[in-house]
Image: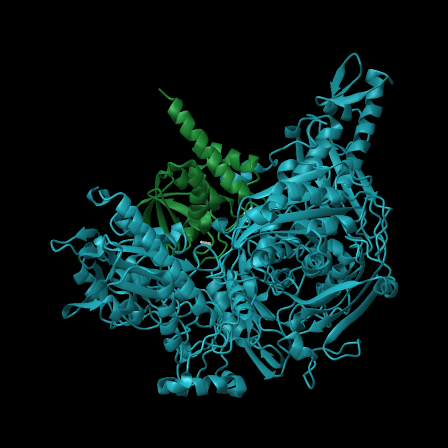
Amino acid sequence: MKYLGARTRVIDWEARTNGSFQYTADVKLDGLLEGVILRSPYSHAKILRVDTSRARTMPGVHAVITAADFPPGARYFHEGVPDRPPLADGVVRFIGQEVAAVAAETRLQAQAALRAIVVEYQQLPGPLTTAAALGRGVSRLHDRQSGVDNVSRSVLRDWGSAETGRRNSTVSVSGDFFFARQTHACMETNIAVAQWSETDQRLEFWTSTQAPYYVASEVANVMGLKQDQVICHEVGVGGGFGSKSKICEHEAIAGLLARLARRPVCVKLSREEEFETTKTRHAFSMSMQLHADSAGQLRVIAGKIDVDNGAYNHSGVSVMGAGIKGLGMLYRPEGLEVSGRLVDTALLPGGQFRGYGTVQTSFAVECLMDDLAEKLGVDPIDLRIRNANQSGEMTLVGAELGSARLVECLTAARDAIGWTREREKDNRRPGRGVGVSASVHVSGSFTMPGANRSDAAIDVFADSRVRVRFGGSDAGTGQKTILALIAAEELGVDLEAVDVQMMESDKTPFDMGAWSSRGTHYGGHAVRKAAVATAERLKGLAASQLGDGDLRLEDGMVKSAARGIPIGTIAQLSNDLKDGILSTETSFVETSVVQADRATGKGNVSPSYNFAAHAAVVDVDRRTGRISVLDYVAVHDIGFALNRITIEGQAIGGAVMGLGAALSEEIIFEQGKVVNPAYLHYALPRAADVPRIRPILIEGGDPRGPYGAKAIGECSINPPPSVISNAVYDAIGVRIRDLPITPDKIINALARREGRSRSHHIWRRPSRWWIAIVRAAYSRGLLKILHARNLRFASHVEPAPLEKVETPATLANVLSAMGADAKLMGGGTDLQLQRRLGLVEPKRLISLAKVAEFQGVKTLADGVIEVGAAVTLTALATAIRHRIPMIAQAIDKIASSQIREMATVAGNLIQAKRCWFFRNGFGCFKRLGGLAPCYAIEGDHRFYHAAIDGHRCQATTPSDLATALSAVGADVVIAGPDGERVVSMDAFYTGPGEAVLTEHEVVRSIRIRAGATARLGAFVKLRLWEGDFAIASVAITANISADGVLHDPRIVIGGLAPTPWRAQQTEGSLDGKPIEIGTFRAALDRELDRAAHPLPRNGWKLDAAAGLSEQALEAVLRAHEAAQAAPVRESA
Amino acid sequence: MQESLRLNVNGKATGVEVAPGSRLLDVLRENLGLVGSKEACGRGECGACTVLIDGRPVASCLVMAETVSGAVTTIEGLADEFADLRRAFADNGAFQCGFCTSGQLVRAAALIREEWPDNPDEREAFVRHRMSGNICRCTGYTGIVDAILLTAQARRSSAADRP
Ligand code: FES
Ligand code: FES
């Protein structure tokens, strides 16, 4: 084959890399309006009244819609009882649910109108966790038919014979596992443009979707239109990962707004809305067991699963079913007995997400496989090989495996990762471990009528160009290119001669879209069939010219042995041309599949099954809990790689997304509201957080796949969580069953195992009594009361417009320009964000970028280094890297290079606290004052809150630069109307991110004290992702004499207390002594124990900070040794 | 309320009428039709809107147009000079959906011009660190990092070959 199986650039690569590829936001239509959505501020409430009358009369407003504008009883389709209306009708069941929407000329006008809509709610209690939902006496969210309150559906799957299996077992392992809510976080936020044509009575969409067919059918459903009245146009799709495989709520809203406004409308979610309101992966709580015999034959997989449905059904029923099904496909136990409950909670609903249930259940079972191997005393890979399903087998759930190369995957993973070498006793390094995991996924599940069918059409033009028409959409999977490759291959034309048109409802034939990993199988077969039919037609037409002999398609021609004629010329011979184009449309129906039996859940739902084994080497830092993934291989049984670039891309991309779930990603709630709705707060992997992923493709063909190909898109996300848990266990002997495996869980597990604990003797510290009492009261109901009294969830809105941005050139001009209506701006990196979050609402901004007095890094006569307030972080790092490397090290770890180029020194020091309650719309004490609560006391405070000195507010000072400057000894020069004053860095802060500045003052410069360059120093930081704010950071500097004695050490810890915290007692105890890490740690632990008053779940930060401090001191020592070895360094 | 500004974008001096405090990203996309720069967060956290100002990569969603005095370069202005990098992106699977790609390319272009570690073993970590302000949710970064390493390497060796 010429094209298939090679490495081919995607056909639209030029446009996708030169900025010209058109996404929905780039679609420009005349008269385009902006649509915005009013959302519920309550987890559960009755809507008593909605009054939109004032909003309708506001300037620029063209349409205001509520539930009353949709047909009565409109509900989205879903398996199980359809229960979600496009706009809330009568009841809201989660914070963020859509209540009304406005279309107006501008976003600002639309938002103003939103604020004018009056909604009267009557709050109802609502279960905010699955445990609460299942508890006694809780309020019911829906009327369900399961017979159990807040259980939307329950299933019991009992395949094979679990009973015999149990009898034949001699060993068993079990565990309770939790898979957190992960969110897709596509780079393009959800966006749709809709336009209604009154003449055609049709609604047109440009929308970022994986399934144009579904958008059309579901929009038609909720709007009371016929499916062919809704059409989609082709547009770039900025990621999907399952989230866009059904309708997304903004699409129906855009459709109705456009219809009523009689103008095109764009509804684009903000990044915050995307995190707060789009459906997530369903969280699974799983209590699972494996039973096996002593020979290592798996006998039974058993367990109970609770799936957090969120507030509405969506795909919950099907995700739960698929998760259990996945367990019936990988191995060969005698029986499987798993029950599941889909539990209603008054939270953001779950939805479709790559991995679809299997990623959750396989996490549990693949961890247990390792536990089982340990119990049996066998190698984990050997155990998996022994139990692996093979080609030709029928699995427990009824899957007919045409090909199954799981054993080959496992063997390849073993070789590639260096399994045997890593596990040899002599090679063992502390903290280092290796882990493996296996997985299986369908290649397009036959979930509903139509899902086993895909149509395609091929057009041949007179100039011999070929166009494939296909109804699905390519959200980045590379499907478009694969379809082109197939057409080029079958028609013997150059790839450059092939165009592919997708998702144009009027022109592209039926296909349900890219979900359930169906693109390869269904799209592949559909286009192949159409191409083969086209080739036959061309040969038939050519026979009159070339004779009936052996004809073939090659080089864009139909060729006989003697000569060839271009296919375009041949096509013109047809008397069936439309507009001069020869079109052939065919329909592919997969007959090998059935829909799963409703009662048993069994059946061969997929034409082929793709397998994978992943393996990784990790390093676990026992002192900080940080896990580094050092090496990662992803081996996939894909039958045949239609295009290696994109197939490997799916393996790598899925693995990294899975690593996100393994290590850091989780949507966190407090009082039902999402706490971390931003890339800043939702820890997903950046380039420096993950290693190179090494994909290995196992081929050999599948009897049913197109050209032998099987899917890959979802299977790659399944193994990483268990790979990491297994590798961590191998490294340090603790089993983490609770995702994501963040540093706190490592530190806590180690402390538990080693029997370590800290005691802070609060009863001996009267200054902390009051706080301890209040904290205790919080958990006993005080929070509830304060929350109810102050309930005021703000959401991000377009910042209020500015009147002016001023750019004064001198300090005097700055001082005279200042005023209550103005804010000073350095790089603006925090100020713009604060405006967006509604934390400040200035009318004027005064940019400090061009103020002469604020520039430059200068060395003054007395050796003091003066850094201008407006010097950017990058500029400071460059200027100081060789003189005080520690400061440059600290800067390198702040945010991103883009932010470091913009952010200024003063701006960094006075940025507001990053507490995720304060920042993300919680009406907390620091926002509202008075009796408003601090949500961090009970909320998730594991990472970013103070363990020392927390008071009314538990936030910390976010600036790493402050920590570093404090450790070298620095002063802040503050200018005001009465001249200048100088404040020591240690006295600069009065609270978390709050400085001594009055409103008439401005930071002019920082002065680093003389002698700082002679000190040795180090800066280390613990964070969840590269560029994140510090969970804890430590800066240490000291003078060290040639004999290794420490003088005047400064130890500053950031992220641990409201302001940078100096370990003064430890400093004192080290001064004048040689460095001894053990003594240092003991002194620091004593001091931390005396000073700390941690919150219930952030005490681990003390261990982590102490561990970081050791590492910092070790680095100082290394610097000292290096300096001793190269004494002439300073003269450079 | 509008004010007139002069901006130098992709080598051309341009006058624009904008509201006070307009974001550079909006001015590029709306006023100048340069839609290659994307908005994925509007908060300076993702890198999709990265442009160069005087060769330095910044998040254009946080820059106010009034404060820009340097030369602005967007993906549209870099596409030709960095055709090799774009091809390397395509050949190494450095994009899937492509939504982050303009930002990745602009950041990478600035990176390729930066001073690199002499030690080849440090280069991957160097690239990963510098590129960490650009989120890609699709590719898992391996392709992006490889495309940058290979392009930088090829440029270095062709520079070395030149007499
Ligand atoms: S859009 Fe500017 S950094 Fe994300
Ligand atoms: S290619 Fe989709 S986010 Fe990077």
Q: Report the quarter where the C terminus of chain A lies.
A: top left
Q: Quadrant of ligand 1?
A: bottom left
Colour chosen for chain B: green
Residue appearing at x 44%, y 32% in the figure: B153
Residue appearing at x 43%, y 53% in the figure: B26
The one of A978 and A361 positioned closer to us in this rendering? A361
User: Going by the image, does A393 lie left or right of A960?
Assistant: right
- Vertical placement of residue A763 versus A843, above or below: below
Colour chosen for chain A: cyan
Query: In which quadrant of the rendered view does residue A562 lie?
Result: top right
The one of A848 and A257 positioned closer to us in this rendering? A848
Residue appearing at x 61%, y 49% in the figure: A423
- Vertical placement of residue A192 versus B110, above or below: below
Residue found farthest to the top: A562
Q: Can the viewer see residue A616?
A: yes
- Vertical placement of residue A893 versus A507, above or below: below
User: Going by the image, does A210 lie left or right of A985?
Assistant: right
Residue A473, x across and y down, in percent: 67, 47
Query: In which quadrant of the rendered view does residue A983 lie?
Result: bottom left
Residue A769, x across and y down, in percent: 40, 87
Q: Can the viewer see residue A647?
A: no
